[in-house]
Amino acid sequence: MPEPMDATPRFPGSPSPFRIDIRNEQNVENHFSVFQDPGTYVDMPRVYVNSLFSSALPPKAQGGQLTLAATPQYHAGVQDADAIAPRPGTIVTYSTAVQPISLAAPGNTPPTSNASDMLYDPDSGSLGLSIPDNLPSVAAGCFQVVVPSFDSPPKHFNVGAALIVDGQIVLSNFVPARPQTSITCRPLLRFHVVAGRHRAGTTIDFDDLSARSALCDFTGGHRQASIAYLPNGSWDVQMS
């Protein structure tokens, strides 16, 4: 039986854990991948999505289950990049930095740590994020990353929402960063399971894959999704 994937970062004040269980009801081995809905980014027409996890499951007769267990702690993420617009199928192997962050409350009441500065040193090449602080102007349900000045080109960066998956930092969804801008993201706790091999960190075609995926929507307070891949290629999704 494949080992469960434990993607449970622990930070003070983290929300309750949720999990996705995947079963293969077909008589052949199948590969399954998981990715997250792109967040809503203010004034950004194109949002990119990466695969979070990918693994094989044997035929039904051999049993087994894949389990993604995670705490929906929001993270801001920044990443080195080699292009302004990544192509689907591209695996970004450059360094990524994350910082746990809170979403802004309506009316900024109570104040939350909802904004972080991207930290980049052109001399050393070091990349990071500051400890988040409160920025009253951030829209409710969002967090913000303030991007500093940098020479573009030759440098390119991606900024967005990140997760820690199986001990690996993955930039779940992102936009290309422009110098001296503020990027505001409203992340969504909606995940998709799709049949197919899409290695973690691979940029995917979200519109294509989501159209044939199983949706696991945790925004309504559900904490568990039980997913079965049926013999006819359809999905059975049970949320609880």
Image: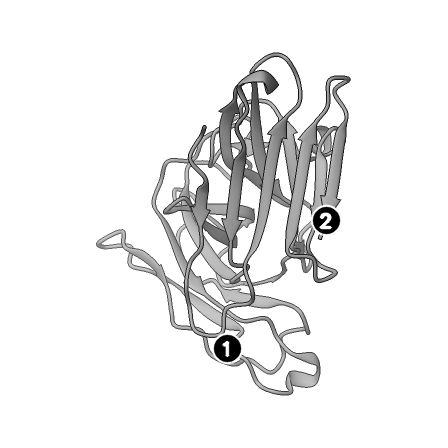
Quarter of image, res 28: top right
Farthest residue, direction left: 124
Please give the name of the residue rendered at 50% of the width and 31% of the height, measured from the top-left corner: 54
Residue 3 image position (x, y, % from top left)? 42, 35
Please give the name of the residue rendered at 51% of the width and 64% of the height, measured from the top-left corner: 145
Residue 15 in the image: above or below residue 201: below
Q: Secondary structure at mark 2?
A: strand
Q: CA distance from mark 1 to mark 2?
A: 31 Å
Which residue does the numbered mark 2 point to in the structure image?
239
| Circle nearer the N terminus (1, 2) | 1
Residue 137 in the image: above or below residue 35: below
> Would you say 95 lies left or right of 77 here?
left
For the question of whether residue 173 can be seen, the reply is yes
Task: Mark 1 vs mark 2: give the one in front.
Answer: 2
Q: Mark on residue 89?
A: none
> Would you say 178 lies left or right of 97 here?
right
Residue 158 image position (x, y, % from top left)? 48, 48
Q: Amino acid at mark 2?
A: Met
Residue 217 image position (x, y, % from top left)? 71, 50
Q: How many marks?
A: 2
Tell me the quarter of the image containing the N terminus: top left
Residue 115 image position (x, y, % from top left)? 51, 72
